Image (tube, rainbow, N blue to C red):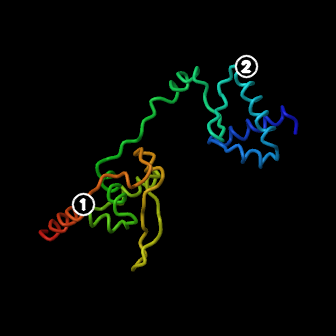
Amino acid sequence: MEQVELSKVIEAILFVSGEPVEQAELEKALEVTSMELTAALDELENDFEREKRGIRLLRFGDHVQLGTRPDYAPYVERLLQPIQKQTLSQAVMETLAVIAYKQPVTRGEIEAIRGVKCDYSVQSLVNKRLICEVGRKETLGRPILYGTTDEFLRHFCISSLDELPRVDFSAVEAAVNAGAAEE
């Protein structure tokens, strides 16, 4: 493969990927040496710079990625900003909290803790991809078990569930059970 063609193939791969790509993976997929890949990446980077294109080649560690040229960022931001996260109602947030802390959990278990129906809240959270079905409980009726998703972690800017604040659900469950006993 010619050098000019190689840099264009790399551009196409990086564009479609959208994510950082390891140089070793490119070498293997394109069947080129490290030296050939470096030369093609240099050519691609120089083309972007020389033409003042809207994208540029980003290199970090052994990864490469396409990114926006900083000069044009204000224009991109005008179109895409403000990026607003969808707000969640109080009922949906309560349902999500129960799922996050008690997962995997069934709809019935959520309703027992919250003391109210949660069909709408669960469906809303599934539609927003903050929770998903993670299995079925081995009990009568085999109800669906729900858990949080990676989108949940991204939405709340945390890297793992370990970063959630500690909560004692036994007090909440006791209060709900006491209220149900009075009725």
Please provide percent x and percent y for residue 10: 75, 38
Cα gap from disc 1 to disc 2, whole angstroms: 60 Å
Residue drawn at x 45%, y 72% is 136
Q: Is residue 134 found left or right of 29 in the rendered image?
A: left
Quadrant assignment for the N terminus: top right
Residue drawn at x 55%, y 22% is 75
Numbered label tally = 2
User: Which quadrant of the structure image shows residue 41?
Assistant: top right
Question: Eyeballing the image, is 72 above or below 40?
Answer: above
Q: Is residue 37 found left or right of 149 in the rendered image?
A: right
Q: Residue furthest bottom?
A: 140
- Packing grade of label 2 (10 A; few <14, some 14-19, many >=20) is few
Secondary element at tag 2: helix
43 or 134, which lies in front?
43
Residue drawn at x 78%, y 38% is 37
Quadrant assignment for the C terminus: bottom left
Secondary element at tag 1: loop
Q: Give the amino acid type for the residue marked by disc 1 in the picture.
A: Asp
The numbered mark, 1 or 2, whose residue comes first in the sequence reads 2
Please provide percent x and percent y for residue 91: 29, 52
Mark number for residue 168?
1
